[in-house]
Image (cartoon, rainbow, N blue to C red):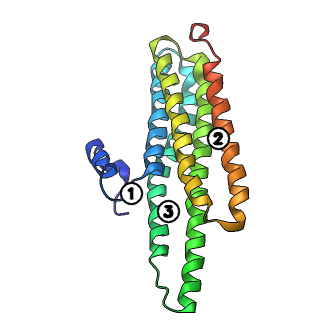
Amino acid sequence: MTDSLWNVSLADLRARTAGASPTPGGGSVAAVTAAFGCALVLMALEITARRDPSVRDAVEAGQVLLDRLGAAADRDVELFEDYLRARRLPRSTDEERAARDAAVAAASVAATEGPLTAAADAVETLEWAFSVLPVVTGTVVSDVRAGADLLLGSVLATLRGAEANVAQLGADAGSFTTRLDAVRRAAVAAHTRFESTPEEAE
């Protein structure tokens, strides 16, 4: 990848996503979505910090998460491009086929681990967002909740991409499926806590 997704305009990113190239795909778009979900929560905290400086620690924690979520967007593109390169390796001889098979297997594992890590980071961000919900007041509470909605959607979308790779993992497929399911359950549970908290109680 020649440039970061974060260095292009929104219009360019939209056009690239709608184009014929397989990247940026679901994983990178989901990571961008997660970053914007986190950013909405940070906005609410920054507004809250004007009158309540005690939330600065929460802001700093959110910035760390935002950096991780943002990096996942470019990382997803890189992992998929690595996988495509492995698929294009020559396979004319037994040695070439063996080398190609090993490269494809390694790239498939990496292309599954990457989304799993990104999804886990988004779950951690969901939990952070819920932890700051009580300190945010006024109309920006809706932004915290909107950020949580985006984060949940990001996790679910990210895991769909990971699931597409699991079938190619052979003996490792079962353990990856177990991990995918655990992250999905954690995301739903974290988001459910938002839904279980009445807005009037905030």
Amino acid identity at mark 3: Leu
Q: Position of residue 154 (x, y in %)?
A: 51, 40
The answer to whether the residue labelled 1 contacts the one labelled 3, judged by CB atoms less than 8 Å apart, is: no
Residue 95 position by quadrant: bottom right
Q: Residues within 10 Å of mark 3 (few under 14, many from 20)?
A: many
Looking at this view, is 179 or 73 the one in front? Answer: 179
- The correct choice, above or below, for 100 with respect to 33 in the image is below
Say which residue label 1 marks. Answer: 23
Q: Is residue 131 visible?
A: no
Which callout, 1 or 3, points to the residue nearer the camera? 1
Mark 1 secondary-structure assignment: loop
Query: In the picture, which quadrant includes the C terminus?
Result: top right
Report whether 11 appears left or right of 65.
Answer: left
- The correct choice, above or below, for 184 with respect to 167 in the image is above
Residue 62 position by quadrant: top right
Mark 2 secondary-structure assignment: helix
Q: Residue at x 49, y 39 (%)?
A: 34
Amino acid identity at mark 2: Arg
- The correct choice, above or below, for 116 with respect to 52 in the image is below
Q: Which mark is residue 195?
A: none
Amino acid identity at mark 1: Thr
Q: How many marks?
A: 3
Q: Which mark is residue 184?
A: 2
In primary-sequence order, the first of circles 1 and 2 is 1
Q: Residue at x 57, y 11 (%)?
A: 199
In primary-sequence order, the first of circles 3 and 2 is 3
Query: In the picture, which quadrant includes the N terminus?
Result: bottom left
The answer to whether the residue labelled 3 contacts the one labelled 2, judged by CB atoms less than 8 Å apart, is: no
In primary-sequence order, the first of circles 1 and 3 is 1
- Whole-number angstrom distance, CA of label 3 to CA of label 2: 21 Å
Q: Which mark is residue 79?
A: 3
Q: Is residue 202 visible?
A: yes
